[in-house]
Image: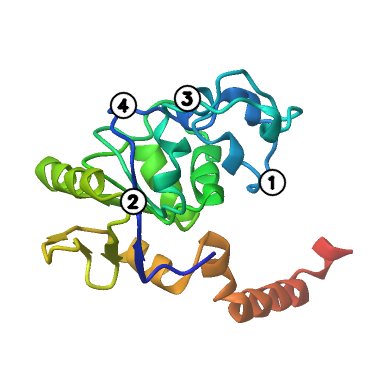
Amino acid sequence: MKAFTQVTAKALPLDRPNVDTDAIIPKQYLKSIKRTGFGPFLFDDWRYLDPGTLDVDPATRRLNPDFVLNDAKHAGAEILLARDNFGCGSSREHAVWALDDQGFRAVIAPSYADIFFSNCFKNGLLPVALKEDEVQALFEVVNADANASITIDLPAQQVRLPDGRSFAFDINPHHKHNLVNGLDEIGLTLQSADAIRAYEAKRRAQTPWLFA
């Protein structure tokens, strides 16, 4: 998993509350479990004017010119600004995979659905929860200047604006440790690989009939 320490980047302002996981990545794309290739289908129903499936090349579809993700001035954004209750709905992990594959390193919102919030940490996407007025301040900065650089400093637990303002955020120490060190659940397990091998060797010696 890619480590997250500090990101300074443009932000995409998605000014909609209660964005559910079906809006983030619709159900027809859940057939694939590769974790990659979902970026072009992110916010699919809002992003395109015609329907799509895994069998339809996104490059052949008509883009919705009124959807913020298709606005050229926001190209390259690595931070997603959202409103209350982001990621509600079903528990599909594909929602996080799609955001990551699109190039987002973090989401900033006032609140999140619990399962989506947990899935973010398992896949290296940082969900930052700020107060509503602080999120509003970020929207105002980005709406005034699409090229404004927002800094998310995870070790310092701060979001910094170009005008010098900074907002503090809380994060579970365990989640922070894993993100800073690029550790997912498999990575954490592999840190104990020597102990696991020693246990399995001892178990094989004590109960050889189980391995016959």
Tell me which label, 1 or 3, sits earlier in the chain.
1
User: Which residue in the structure is indicated by mark 1?
Assistant: 34
Give the number of the disc on residue 46. 3
Against 176, is 37 above or below? above
Badge 3 element: helix
Q: Nearer the viewer, residue 113 or 65?
A: 65
Q: Position of residue 99 (x, y in %)?
A: 49, 45
Tell me which label, 1 or 4, sits earlier in the chain.
4
Q: Nearer the viewer, residue 73 or 197?
A: 73
Q: Count neighbours of disc 1 (C-alpha within 10 A) and say few if under 14, some if 14 to 19, many if 20 or more.
A: few
Tell me which label, 2 or 3, sits earlier in the chain.
2
Judge depth for marks 1 and 3 and give the one in front: 3
Judge depth for marks 2 and 4 and give the one in front: 2
Residue 133 figure quarter:
top left
Residue at the location (40% across, 47% down)? 74
Q: Position of residue 27 (x, y in %)?
A: 59, 24
User: Which residue in the structure is indicated by mark 4?
Assistant: 18
Residue at the location (45% across, 46% down)? 119
* 52 relative to 212 in the view: left or right: left
Which part of the image, by quadrant, shows the C terminus? bottom right
Circle 4: residue type: Asn
Q: Cα distance, mark 1 to mark 4?
A: 27 Å
Q: Are marks 1 and 4 in contact (CB under 8 Å)?
A: no
Which part of the image, by quadrant, shows the N terminus? bottom right
Give the number of the disc on residue 11. 2
Judge depth for marks 2 and 1 and give the one in front: 2
Tell me which label, 2 or 4, sits earlier in the chain.
2
Circle 1: residue type: Lys
Badge 4 element: loop
